[in-house]
Structure formats: C-alpha cells, structure tokens
Amino acid sequence: MRSPDTDLLMSAQTFVRQVVAPVAAAADEREEFPVDVFRAAGRFGVFGAGFPSEYGGLALGWAVYTGLIREIAQACASTAMSAVAHATLAMLPIFLGGSERLKQRLLPALIGGEAIAAFAMTEAGSGSDIAAIATTATDAGEHFLLNGSKVFITNANVADVAVVVAKTAPAAGILGLSLLAVERGTPGFQATGRRERKLGMRASDTGELVFTDALVPKDNLIGRRNGGFAILQRTLPAARLDMAAIAIGISERARDLCVDHAVGRRQFGKPIGRFQLVQQMLADMETSIDAASLLLARGLELRERGLPLAKAASEAKLFASEMAVEITRNAIQVHGASGYSRDLPLERLYRDAKLTEIGDGTSEIQRLIIADEMIKERLARIPGR
C-alpha cells in the first residue's frame, strides 16, 4: 500500500502537467503572476503539506512539501518561487511565533491559497546585512507604528499579508529585530504597484512595500518583541532548502530535454547522444543532480528532526544553484541553435536558474555561512572553550 505522501507526489505530476505547465511560458512572456495557478496550488495542498491539520494543513512533513516545490519548478520556477515566499518565508514565521489567535486567523486562508503572503526583509540599504535594516516599529500603545520601505519583495503587489522585519530596538542591531504580520488595508501600508523587470522568474511578482506611520496591532507581533532574529534563524535555512529544490527541479527539466534531444537528434549518421562529448555533459548533469538531491535530503532530514541545519541548508543551496546555472547553460549547448531559440523552454530555464544563486542569500554568503559553521564546530571540540 502506498503512503499518502507518495500518492500526493505522484498526483502532483499530473497537477503540474495539467495546471502549471500550460501557462508557464505565456506568464513568463507577459511577466504576469499566474494567480489562478497559485490558488489552484493551494487547493491541491502544496502550501499545507508541511503544516498541521488544525490550520488546514495535510501534516505530511516538510520533505513532501519540498518535493512538491521541486516538481512545480520543473514546469514553472516562477510559481515555485512565489510558493516558497508564501509558504516558507511568510507562513512559517507565523506558525513558529504567532499567537494561537493570529495563527487561527491567518493560516487557514493562506494554506488554502485564498490569501497570499509576502516576506518583507530586503531594503535598498540592506540585503544580506540584516543588521542594516532601517525599517522601524515603535511603541504606540495598542499598536506598533511602522515606518520604512522594502524592495525586491516576492508577491509584494498581490499579497494580502506581509511578514515584515523591523527594528523595535534600533541600538541592539540584529537583537533588536521583530517580525510583524501586516495585513492589506492597514492604514499607512501600501504596495507601490511597481513591478521589477527581471532577467528570470518573470512570472513571480516582485515589488516594493512602503510603510508610513502604519498602525499594526500588537496582536500581530510574531514571537516576542526583539526576538525576530531567532525566528529568522529557523526560517531562512528552511527557505534555502526550498531554493535548492527549485534549482534541482530546473536542472531535472533541462536534463530531460537534453536526453530526449540526444536520442532524437541525428548528425553524421547517428544520434548525437552517441558522441562522447555529449555523453560527458549528460553524465555530469545526472551526477550533479543526484549529488544535489542527496545534499537536499540530508538537510530535510535534519529539519524533520529539529536539528541545526544552517550549514547543511547552505551547502544544498550553494551546490544546487551553481549546478542549475551550469546544467542549463550546457543544455542550451547540447541543443545548439534550437536551445537558444525561445521556442524551447531552455532559455527560460537558464534565466530562472540564475536567481537561485542570488535569492535567499547569494552563493558568496552561503560560503561564508558554511565556513563560519565549520569554525564553530571545530572550536566547540577544543577543551576549555
């Protein structure tokens, strides 16, 4: 007898083929967020796979959820990216730190896809440097008074709620950060309507949020005041695992197209898959995807067990994202002129792959995290330290 998670992942292939894939190219071409597809993903169970049933989730675990993200990314990385911003970066903090009343009020609609969430951390003057965040939330009795702006925010223009990172104790640096759930219609809160014109993942809405004396109820505080960094330490590594899954999904689609082309395309009287240089590229693709999948699986196991996963998540994201860029580039090479044409999805896969090296922390930041964790582990083994 097959398990429910196996059944869901198998049916996800049909869902992706019938619902996600048919609109992917057109949505990218128009740079238009496919809201109907997004809501359908919620009804299918994508967003709730890892969350418990009391909030409308399926309680199948994070490995199943990440598997769904990987499946969607094969057809439309933009939709997968929007899903991660929604379900991991925004919903997870609410689940981890929100009051029971806040969770009951927000999570069911978000899990079902009736509402859309955004995660608002990046600012014009702060990306990976979280301590440089300038957005502030000051005490105003029963509310926080929120002031600042956020840029490059996924789902910004379509979000019903944004999880906002702000300073509630500016002098304390990262130890003075708090997370607030800011809902559409909050006085002083608006999306500017500006949509970033991007190289890739063009069907994923990316925009700017502005807060001008926005009055946010204190009930919407996620976790304790000045305790936002602790929640980010659990949220960001999880998102990096999901970014690795997106990169692997992109790579799998590129590989499959290459194998089909290598079998069907003939030159000099034989399939090009019989040429050793093409075989080398195919073998490298397969080996790299398998290696990335193992790194992802290790990170997911640590997450399921509640163990520290910062280093494992960064390793998975670093390897998978750089692999995706290389595989999609080589896939275009295997296809020659047809690979460069927009009639095939390879150029879109190549463009989409690049963002996986940047989003949720650049490759350079991932290397710093990995090295820092290595040093911490070594120092912890030194007696007397």
Image (cartoon, rainbow, N blue to C red):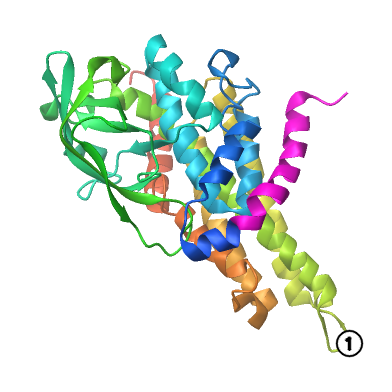
Looking at the rendered image, the quarter that the C terminus falls into is: top left
Query: Which sits in the foreground, 80 or 27?
Result: 27
Q: Give the amino acid type for the residue marked by disc 1 in the picture.
A: Gly
Magenta stretch in the rendered image: 1-23
Q: Is residue 115 magenta?
A: no
Query: Which sits in the foreground, 174 or 55?
Result: 55
Residue at the far bottom in the pictured view: 268
Classified by dominant secondary structure, the portion drawn in magenta counts as helix
Residue at the far top in the pictured view: 100
In the picture of the structure, the residue carrying the numbered disc 1 is 269
Residue at x 55% of width, y 42% of height = 38
Residue 237 seen by the camera = no
Image position of 333 with respect to 323: above or below = below
Residue at x 43% of width, y 36% of height = 374
- Coordinates of residue 210 in the picture (x, y in percent): 21, 42
Image side of residue 38 versus residue 253, left or right: left
Q: Is residue 10 magenta?
A: yes
Image side of residue 137 versus residue 267, left or right: left
**Label 1's element?**
loop
- Coordinates of residue 324 in the picture (x, y in percent): 57, 58
- Coordinates of residue 223 in the picture (x, y in percent): 32, 17
Residue at x 36% of width, y 29% of height = 232
Image position of 245 with respect to 358: above or below = above
